[in-house]
Image: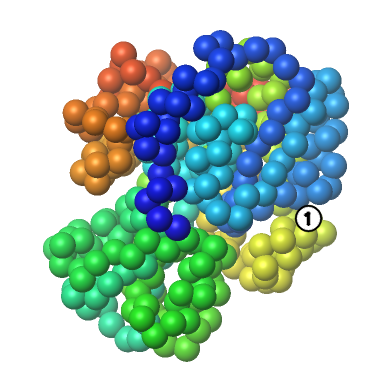
């Protein structure tokens, strides 16, 4: 993967210019997802028929499509090829929202509590990263985690010999080469790499709990024009969450196998994921005072890296709205919205 994966201002302008100004009512929808412990339910919902059941309830059709490259899935959503995509809070802010696509966090599924990690080949500590190259998906949450890790030991990216952009699809193969000395990635890749002899975990997302948040985000205009789309997605999601929370072995095994591991391996990954199985838990988290603070920190990181939208004058360039009506960033340019409406409906049994 190269930086050409990231939407340029010219490409974004062309895409936005070709998009309809107002979303229309429709009956067919597509959402994209990529392999990650907290997003495996999306594949299961498609394969098991749970998504079809909920879509039929609302008289619509929803197709859930797996994309092998995470950043590419977000780019395709940004380009209008999908109505929704599984993404983190940071990558939603930097790619679609930063590119001008008004996006709503429909489902706050979990936060990473150990699933994202900085891994060194051989023995050592975070301080030993000085002078070494680090492979990661550049400008993704892995880059953010690395920055937080380095800061904890009074280092910065300037102290490394470089950051090498590596697709998540290529990460395991890259780690096996002699050139790679350290990586930052997410599960299930973390688990696979830590199984290699000599792999040492130096830092993980449990050291910054609640900062790497895993979402299903959708196009705001599409959602507003088609509320049944939101209801169907949320209904199917929480039916699947109930299966997972109950320990349904068939469902969990299917998710495990789809992610390239076994039931025990998948359960180990879930143990380092703070899943919000109950919609009320997700609502509480999304309404917390900590979320705006996290988003300000994320915006500052993105601005520092020059990826908070083309020509962003400050870390406040993109406005982020929260359930209580408050905003961070530019309230005249709100492009990212945390909305608990549909999760609250699930909590109330109103779907």
- The color scheme shown is rainbow
Q: Can residue 291 be seen in this view?
A: no
Q: Label 1: which residue?
A: 251
Q: Residue 221's spot in the image, x, y percent?
A: 55, 17
Instruction: Determine whether, in the image, residue 236 is placed left or right of residue 268.
Output: right
Instruction: Determine whether, in the image, residue 59 is placed left or right of residue 299.
Output: right
Regarding mark 1 in the picture, which secondary structure is present there? helix
Residue ID at (78%, 44%) = 46
Residue ID at (72%, 61%) = 258
Instruction: Determine whether, in the image, residue 78 is placed left or right of residue 32.
Output: left
Q: Residue 137's spot in the image, x, y percent?
A: 41, 58
Q: Which of 281 and 53 is in front in this view?
A: 53
Q: Residue furthest bottom?
A: 197
Q: Residue 310's spot in the image, x, y percent?
A: 29, 33
Categorize mark 1 by other alpha carbons within 10 Å: few (<14), some (14-19), many (20+).
some
Instruction: Determine whether, in the image, residue 112 is placed left or right of residue 328.
Output: right
Residue ID at (27%, 56%) = 148
Q: Nearer the viewer, residue 309 or 324?
A: 309
Q: Can residue 250 be seen in this view?
A: yes
Looking at the image, is 206 positioned above or below residue 192? above
Residue ID at (48%, 27%) = 15
Q: In which quarter of the image is the C terminus?
A: top right
Q: How many labels does the image show?
A: 1
Q: Nearer the viewer, residue 42 or 305?
A: 305
Q: In which quarter of the image is the N terminus?
A: bottom left
Q: Residue 63's spot in the image, x, y percent?
A: 75, 36
């Amino acid at each position: 993967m190269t930086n050409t994966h990231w939407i340029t201002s010219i490409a974004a302008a062309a895409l936005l210019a070709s998009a309809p100004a107002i979303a229309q009512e429709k009956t067919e929808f597509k959402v994209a997802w990529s392999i990650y412990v907290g997003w495996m339910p999306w594949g299961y919902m498609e394969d098991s028929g749970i998504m079809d059941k909920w879509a039929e309830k609302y008289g619509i059709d929803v197709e859930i499509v797996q994309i092998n490259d995470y950043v590419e899935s977000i780019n395709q959503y940004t380009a209008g090829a999908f109505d929704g995509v599984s993404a983190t809070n940071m990558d939603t802010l930097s790619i679609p929202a930063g590119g001008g696509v008004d996006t709503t966090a429909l489902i706050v599924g979990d936060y990473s509590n150990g699933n994202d990690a900085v891994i060194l080949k051989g023995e050592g500590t975070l301080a030993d990263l000085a002078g070494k190259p680090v492979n990661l998906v550049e400008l993704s949450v892995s880059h953010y985690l690395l920055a937080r890790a380095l800061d904890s030991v009074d280092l910065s990216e300037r102290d490394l010999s470089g950051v090498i952009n590596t697709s998540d699809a290529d990460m395991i193969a890259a780690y096996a080469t002699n050139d790679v000395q350290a990586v930052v990635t997410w599960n299930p890749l973390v688990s696979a790499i830590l199984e290699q002899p000599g792999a040492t975990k130096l830092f993980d997302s449990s050291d910054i709990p609640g900062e790497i948040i895993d979402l299903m985000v959708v196009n705001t205009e599409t959602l507003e024009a088609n509320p049944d789309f939101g209801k169907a997605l949320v209904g199917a999601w929480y039916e699947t969450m109930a299966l997972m929370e109950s320990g349904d072995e068939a469902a969990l095994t299917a998710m495990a196998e789809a992610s390239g591991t076994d039931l025990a391996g998948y359960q180990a990954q879930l143990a380092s994921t703070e899943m919000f199985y109950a919609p009320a838990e997700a609502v509480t988290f999304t309404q917390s005072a900590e979320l705006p603070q996290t988003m300000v920190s994320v915006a500052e990181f993105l601005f520092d890296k020059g990826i908070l939208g083309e020509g962003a004058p400050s870390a406040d360039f993109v406005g982020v709205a929260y359930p209580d009506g408050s905003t961070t960033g530019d309230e005249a340019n709100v492009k990212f919205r945390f909305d608990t409406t549909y999760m609250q409906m699930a909590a109330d049994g109103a779907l």
